[in-house]
Image: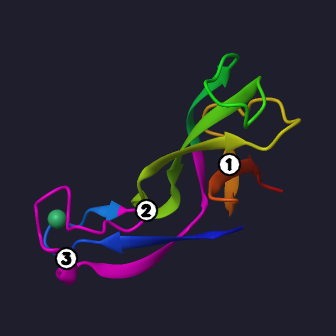
C-alpha cells in the first residue's frame, strides 16, 4: 500500500494530492502556510468507468478508471485499475500505488 504526498490547509482543512504548489485552491491561503502530509493510498470505490477510446496509446484500451474516496475523509482520487482485473464494485476496498507517475488501484487482500 502506497502513500501519497499531500498538502493540508490549516485555514480551511483542504487536503490536496499532489501538494498544491501555489497555495490553497479552496480559500487562497499562501503556499507557505500549507502543511506537508502523507495520505495512505487506500479507500473505497465511489465510481468506475471503462474506457474504450483514449487519445493516448498508454494505457492500452480498454482500461478502467476508478474513483476512490480515501480513508479518513481524504479526497476522492481517480486512478487506473491494475491491468487484467475486473472492475471493482461500488464500495469495495482498494489500495493504490503510484507507478511511473500514474495512480494504480487494485483490490485489497
Ligand atoms: Zn484553504
Determine which of the numbered discs, if any, sits on residue 93 in the image.
1
Label 3 or label 2, whichever comes before in sequence order: 3
Residue 32 horizontal side relative to residue 65, left or right: left
- Looking at the rendered structure, which numbered label has been put on residue 80? none
Identity of the residue drawn at 11% across and 70% down: 29
Q: Secondary structure at mark 1?
A: strand
Of the four image quadrants, the one with ligand 1 is: bottom left
Q: Kindly tell me whether mark 3's CB lies below 8 Å from ligand 1.
A: yes
Picture coordinates of residue 43, whole percent (x, y): 58, 54
27 lies left or right of 44: left
Element carrying mark 2: loop
Q: Is mark 1 within 8 Å of ligand 1?
A: no
- Looking at the rendering, the stretch of residues picked out in magenta corresponds to 16-44
Quadrant holding the C terminus: bottom right
What's the residue at 78%, 31% (across, down)? 60
Disc 1 and disc 3: Cα gap in Å? 29 Å
Q: Please state if 29 lies on the left or on the right of 89 as rendered.
A: left
Q: Is residue 27 magenta?
A: yes
Q: Which mark is residue 10?
A: 3
Q: Nearer the viewer, mark 1 or mark 3?
A: 3
Amino acid at each position: 500500500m502506497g502513500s501519497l504526498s499531500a498538502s493540508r490547509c490549516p485555514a480551511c482543512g483542504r487536503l490536496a494530492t499532489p501538494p498544491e504548489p501555489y497555495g490553497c485552491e479552496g480559500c487562497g491561503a499562501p503556499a507557505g502556510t500549507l502543511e506537508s502530509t502523507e495520505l495512505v493510498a487506500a479507500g473505497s470505490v465511489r465510481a468506475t468507468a471503462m474506457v474504450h477510446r483514449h487519445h493516448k496509446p498508454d494505457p492500452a484500451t480498454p482500461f478502467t478508471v476508478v474513483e476512490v474516496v480515501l480513508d479518513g475523509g481524504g479526497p476522492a482520487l481517480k486512478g487506473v485499475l491494475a491491468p487484467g482485473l475486473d472492475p471493482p464494485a461500488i464500495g469495495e476496498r482498494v489500495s493504490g500505488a503510484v507507478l511511473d507517475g500514474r495512480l494504480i488501484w487494485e483490490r485489497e487482500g
